């Protein structure tokens, strides 16, 4: 790889982090005149929490925004024809930007929708498989966090089946581990049987 391409990769990775740092929940709530999601419900700036106090429209826009900021950087990286490792790191940077946004005191969401956007960027089949798993589990158990954990736990398997890139598999596993860590309070609540169902109002 020549120096110019390496510089492009570094710039794309940095730009992806900045894009990921744009908090869709906070921006959507501000535009729609809703309270700051970081001070409502669970305090998590994500679509599930926005649904609790802002309704389906605000939650849907938030979900789309979080997915897009994971999807677009990966598609741009692929269009720029950078290395497979570079593409994987671009996706990871967008994911980490969502979790630790530089524009919002490094206090971000839990990363499910952004990781899903990255999966769609890697491959539409991987994204559809991951999203389908989440929707199937949500329909049955009606617990957003558990549905997300099951879907993301299977994401590395889907990457291995359809993409089979060591770099992409490794990055996906890394994102899954971080996502489980970010959901540790939800896991504790599930073990106690007190985790909220989808749409539960905590305000």
Image (cartoon, rainbow, N blue to C red):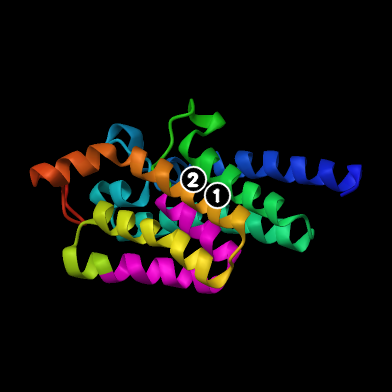
Magenta stretch: includes residue 127: yes
Give the main secondary structure of the magenta stretch.
helix
Left or right of residue 50, residue 167 in this image: right
At a point 64% along the width and 57% down the height, the residue shown is: 74
Q: Quadrant of residue 109?
A: top left
Query: Which of the two residues, 75 or 4, is positioned nearer the viewer here?
Result: 4
Judge whether 187 appears above or below 125 on screen.
above
Q: Residues within 10 Å of mark 2 (few under 14, many from 20)?
A: few
Residue located farthest toward the top when viewing the structure as drawn: 105
At a point 67% along the width and 61% down the height, the residue shown is: 75
Magenta stretch: includes residue 132: yes
Query: Which of the two residues, 137 or 40, is positioned nearer the viewer here?
Result: 137
Judge whether 168 appears above or below 135 on screen.
above
Magenta range is 112-136
Do we see residue 179 in this rendering? yes
At a point 38% along the width and 41% down the height, the residue shown is: 45
Residue behind mark 1 = 171
Q: Residues within 10 Å of mark 1 (few under 14, many from 20)?
A: some
At a point 24% along the width and 49% down the height, the residue shown is: 52
How far apart are labels 2 and 1 at the CA level?
Answer: 5 Å
Image x and y of residue 156, in percent: 46, 59
- Tell whether label 1 touches label 2 (CB within 8 Å): yes
Image x and y of residue 199, in percent: 20, 56
Image x and y of residue 138, in percent: 25, 65
Query: Which of the two residues, 43 or 112, is positioned nearer the viewer here?
Result: 112
> Which quarter of the rendered picture does the C terminus lie within?
top left
Do we see residue 29 in this rendering? no
Per the image, label 1 sits on a secondary structure element best described as helix
Per the image, label 2 sits on a secondary structure element best described as helix
Left or right of residue 137, residue 83 in this image: right
Image x and y of residue 137, in percent: 25, 66
Residue 174 tag number? 2
């Amino acid at each position: 790889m020549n120096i110019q391409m390496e510089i492009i990769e570094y710039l794309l990775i940095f730009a992806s982090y900045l894009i990921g740092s744009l908090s869709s929940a906070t921006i959507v709530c501000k535009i729609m005149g809703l309270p700051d999601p970081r001070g409502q419900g669970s305090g998590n700036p994500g679509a599930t929490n926005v649904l609790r106090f802002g309704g389906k429209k605000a939650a849907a826009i938030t979900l789309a925004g979080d997915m897009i900021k994971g999807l677009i950087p990966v598609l741009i990286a692929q269009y720029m024809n950078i290395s497979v490792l570079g593409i994987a790191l671009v996706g990871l940077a967008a994911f980490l930007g969502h979790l630790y946004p530089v524009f919002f005191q490094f206090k971000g969401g839990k990363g499910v929708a952004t990781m899903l956007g990255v999966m769609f960027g890697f491959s539409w089949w991987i994204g559809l498989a991951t999203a389908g798993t989440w929707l199937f589990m949500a329909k049955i158990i009606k617990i957003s966090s558990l549905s997300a954990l099951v879907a993301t736990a299977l994401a590395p398997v889907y990457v291995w089946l359809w993409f089979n890139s060591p770099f992409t598999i490794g990055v996906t596993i890394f994102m899954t581990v971080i996502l489980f860590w970010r959901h540790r309070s939800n896991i504790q609540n599930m073990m106690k049987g007190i985790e909220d169902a989808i749409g539960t109002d905590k305000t």
